[in-house]
Image (cartoon, rainbow, N blue to C red):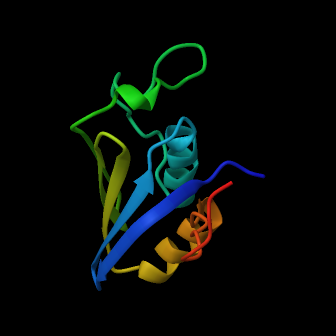
Amino acid sequence: MKKKFIIIGMENDGYRSQYVFKKNSNFNRVFINFLVDLGFVNVDFDASFENGKEGLLNISKFKDEENHFKNKSFDIDLFYGDKKAILIVRTKNRAKLIRILEKYSVFPKIKEPGKKRK
């Protein structure tokens, strides 16, 4: 399966959308592809975002960090918490955002009430 974001929460207020993702080792790589599809070119990531021969730091060490990205269609803030990443997107082109987000996202499997985990 292709590497994707795992969405654990979302909220929309028309122009402003918020998505909460599970923070995992694939997050930054998927996020870079997500930005490219949103029309970001030559994104200037700071040293905390990219590093090493793999191209990305272990994001489990990212806590209370923020990155900001902006182009003519999208204004994005990315916050790293302890166990999750929060993406806030301001745009008038929500249809494009949703289409691209669907390409890069999955929802976690939800345990049915009353069933034991294996």
Image check: 30 left or right of 85? Answer: right
Quadrant including the C terminus: bottom right
Q: Is residue 47 above or below residue 49?
A: above
Tell me if 63 is positioned left or right of 30 in this view.
left
Q: Residue 55 lies in what quarter of the image?
A: top right
Q: Residue furthest bottom?
A: 14
Q: Is residue 3 rendered to the left or right of residue 82?
A: right
Percent of width and height locating residue 49: 39, 30
**Residue ranking furthest to the top:** 53
> Image point 47% across, 39% down: which residue?
42
Tally of numbered discs: 0
- Among all residues in the image, which is located at the extreme right? 1
* Residue 37 position by quadrant: bottom right
Point out residue 115 in the picture as x, y percentages from the top left corner.
Answer: 62, 70
Pinpoint residue 107: horizontal percent, then vertical percent: 57, 67
Residue drawn at (49%, 46%) of the image: 41
Tell me what residue is drawn at x 62 percent, y 58 percent.
117
Rendered position, 52 above or below 18 = above
Answer left or right for 57 relative to 61. right
Q: Give the percent coordinates (x, y) of residue 50.
A: 45, 25
Q: Residue at x 38, y 34 (%)?
A: 44
Q: Is residue 76 above or below residue 107?
A: above
